Image: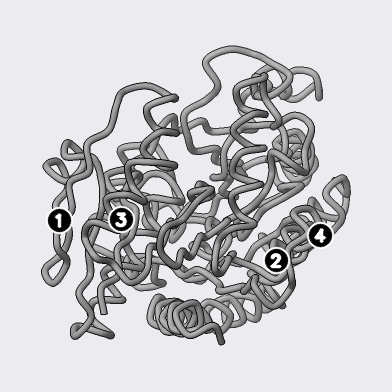
Amino acid sequence: MRIVLSGWFWDRPETGSGQYVQRLLETLVQLEPAITWGLAAPPAVLAASPPPPGVQSFPVPARRGDLGKVWWEQVTLPRAARRWRADLLHVPYWAPPAAPPIPTVVTVHDIIPRLLRAYRGGPAVRLYTALVSAATLQATRVLTDSAASRQDIVRELRLPPERVQAIPLAVSPAYSPTPAPGDEPARQALGLKPGYVLYLGGFDIRKNLQTALAACGWVHEALPDTRLVVAGHLPASDSAFAPDPHRLLAALGLAEEVVHWTGPVTEAIKPALYRGARAFLYPSRYEGFGLPALEALACGVPVVGSQAASIPEVVGTAGVLTDPDDVAGMAGALIQLLTDDHFHADLRARALSQAARFSWEATAQATLAAYRQALTGG
C-alpha cells in the first residue's frame, strides 16, 4: 500500500498543522512500517526539514504566493500523487482537492472562518473558504480533532455524519510533570519564579484575553504577589481582530505590574513555562481542539477556562470551566488553586490522568483505521 501525506506545513512545527503532520507521520511509520509512506512537499520544505526514516521524500514544485499555494493544493499535488501511484492521499489541513484522482482523506481541524464573522477575512479569504468547503464534499473521509468540531462540520458543510470522524490529538513527550535540567535556567532568563498563572494561547479576538486579564486583576487584589504570565508575540498593532493587550489592561484599570509579558517563546522552553505554573488560564471562546490546554495537563497543571466548544472534551474534570464571560468564576477558581494545596493536588492528579488518555499512538491507530475505511468503502 502506498500512502502520501501533504507536507505543506511540514517545516513549521510552531503551527498546529505542522505539529500534527510531523507527530502523526512519525507514529504511523512506527506502527505500519510495511506501508510505503510518502511526504509530498515543495522542495525547499523537504530540504530544510527531511522526513523521518521510513518515509520517502516526494518533492512537488510550488509557485510562490497565495495563488501558487492554491494551485499546488488543487492541481499539482493530486496529479503528483497519482503519478506516484499512491493508493491514498491525506491532506492534514483544510485544503482537499476539489477533483481528487485517488481516494482522499482530509483533516479539518476547525471551520472557524465559517463560524466566526471576525475570521471571514476579505474577498480572497472568503473565496478560499468557499473553495475548500466545496472540495471537502468530495473527500472520501473527513477527520477532525473533537466531537464539537465534528458536529460543526456535519452541520455547516452538510456532510453525511458517517463520513466525518473525530480523532483527538496528543502532545509531545516533552510535556510531562518531570522537571528538566533546563527548566530553571529558562524561567530565570525570562525573570520568572514558579507559582504564577500562565496564559499561552494567542491574541486574536476569540482567545478572549480581556477576560483573562480581568480575572487576574481580581486575583491580584486578593494575592498581590501573584502574576499572570502572558507568553507569546504580542500583536504588532491594535485592531478589532487582535486587540493590544496593554490597551485592554489599561481599559480595565489595571496596572502593568499585574502581568509579566515574556514576549515570544520557543517550542523548546514551553514545557518549562508550564511546569513553573500553578494554573493555566484558557478562556477561549472557540477551539477546534485546544492543544495548549492538553500541554498544560500533561505537565500536571490544572486548567481554568471556558466551557466553550471542544475545551470540555480536552480538560474533562482536570480543571474548572465556566462561561467565557464569567470573570468572577475564573478568578475564584484561580484563587482557590493558588491558596488551597489540597484542591490543587486533586486537580493536578486529575490533570495527569486526563492527559494520559491522549497519545499519538492512539491518534495514529485511529487514523490508520480511517485510511482503511476510505480504501474499502467501510
> Residue beneath label 2, please?
150
In the rendered view of the protein, which quadrant contains the N terminus? bottom left
> Residue beneath label 4, please?
155
Q: Nearer the viewer, mark 2 or mark 1?
A: 1
Instruction: Decide if residue 181 is on the left or right side of residue 245.
Output: left
Asked whether 318 or 68 is in front, the reply is: 68
Residue at 42 percent of width and 45 percent of height: 15
Q: CA distance from mark 4 to mark 3?
A: 44 Å
Q: SS class of the residue under badge 3?
A: helix
Kindly identify the amino acid type of the residue bearing the numbered disc 1: Ser
Kindly identify the amino acid type of the residue bearing the numbered disc 2: Arg
Instruction: Decide if residue 52 is on the left or right side of residue 139.
Output: left
Q: Is residue 29 above or below residue 285?
A: below
Q: CA distance from mark 4 to mark 2?
A: 9 Å
Residue at 65 percent of width and 24 percent of height: 242
Q: CA distance from mark 3 to mark 1?
A: 35 Å
Q: Is residue 160 above or below residue 216?
A: below
Give percent across and percent down for residue 249: 72, 24
Q: Earlier in the sequence, mark 3 or mark 1?
A: 1
Give percent across and percent down for residue 275: 43, 61
Q: Earlier in the sequence, mark 4 or mark 1?
A: 1
Which numbered tag is attached to residue 186? none
Q: CA distance from mark 2 to mark 3?
A: 37 Å
Q: SS class of the residue under badge 4?
A: helix
Q: Earlier in the sequence, mark 4 or mark 3?
A: 4
Q: SS class of the residue under badge 2?
A: helix
> Residue beneath label 1, please?
57
> Residue beneath label 3, please?
183
Q: Are the residues tagged 2 and 3 within 8 Å (C-beta)?
A: no
Q: Nearer the viewer, mark 4 or mark 2?
A: 4
